[in-house]
Amino acid sequence: MGKFVDCPFCGERGKKTKEHVWAQWLHKTEGAMTLLTDTHGERIQRRRTVLRKDQSGRYQAVSVTPVPYAKWLPNVTVSVCEDCNCGWMSHLEDEAKAILAKFIFDGATLQLAEGNLQTLATWASKSWMAYALTRAAHQNPFTRADYRAMVSSPRPFHDGRILLMHSEEPIAHVGMGITSWLMSSGDSVPDMEVAPDNTGYAYLAVATVVLIMTFVPTEAAGVADILAPNLASSPLVQHAWPDPHPHDFPLGALPAGTLANFLVAAEQTREAVGLPTEGLTDDDLAGILDRYWNGVDPAQLRRRFDKP
């Protein structure tokens, strides 16, 4: 393994270090210790599927070579440079820990000011950006400019709406995920082999503290209102970004099953609003986009164009 890395965050070449996508200081939480009991850093082969054009110009889903991947989330790492890892990343982790530790380890109620909420939203954004590096490049919704901006001036993801909540469900102890898809709002069809996802959800769960982000491109901001309507309007959920509202945390635990149901609904929403691509040409996709932006329901388009 090389000693240096072209850092995905700052873009500079530097000494290679490992950044835990699910913060290492959280390994001392009850959920993480239970999960990692009798484990030995096992790794698995993670399969990836990408879109590639065949000889006839039609997009086909193709499996690429599996890559080794940590089996348990607390052990998942990505390579970043030492300057980032030991600099702004370490500082951000310290700030998040200072805010959350009294609740996570002592069960104390927190009084969260606007600055605290922005810090937590920034910390979660950094964590999702690190986690996204484990995905295929076109499934990473964060651009090179987003990574550079996080380094130069750490802030929450600009296209995201981030919610903070408390859940006592098992999946709220150790969890992270991104569900994303590509939403094209222009007249031209993007190259589906390389165009990155730009719409979807991300969630981060640490010791019953849960942050959820919905994100859409600026030109399709109206779609954001359909992504998490029930959570966004719940009196038990705080808005961390944008327009953070100071409040005590937690406001109460979400009803049992709320988080699990949301994560299922996230995938269902992706399927509901996503457009067909497999087996289609760029001309086919141009016609589909035209119908979509003229009000044709995505489900109707999938029934017509999806492969049987």
Image (cartoon, rainbow, N blue to C red):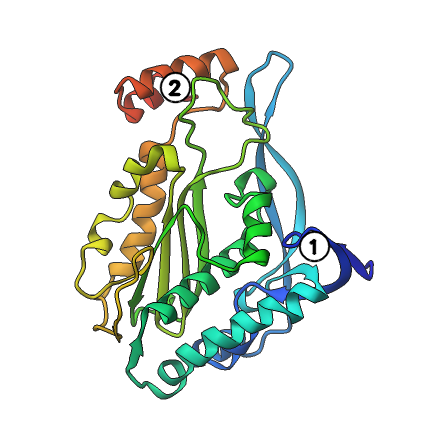
Q: Secondary structure at mark 1?
A: loop
Nearer to us in this view, 195 or 306: 195
**Which disc number belongs to residue 289?**
2
Which residue is at 57% across, 44% downward?
145
Can residue 229 be seen by looking at this rendering? yes
Using the rendered view, name the quadrant where residue 216 is placed. top left
Label 1 vs label 2, nearer the camera: 1
Residue 281 visible at all: no
Q: Image quadrant of residue 168?
A: bottom left
What residue is disc 1 on?
Answer: 7
Q: Position of residue 105 (x, y in %)?
A: 40, 85
Identify the amino acid type marked 2: Leu
Q: Which mark is residue 206?
A: none
Relative horizontal placement of residue 84, taking residue 188 as reference (left or right): right
**Left or right: residue 28 compared with residue 106:** right
Indicate the secondary structure of the residue bearing disc 2: helix
Closer to the camera in the image, 84 or 70? 84
Q: Residue at x 67, y 49 (%)?
A: 67
Q: Does label 1 or label 2 sit earlier along the sequence?
A: 1
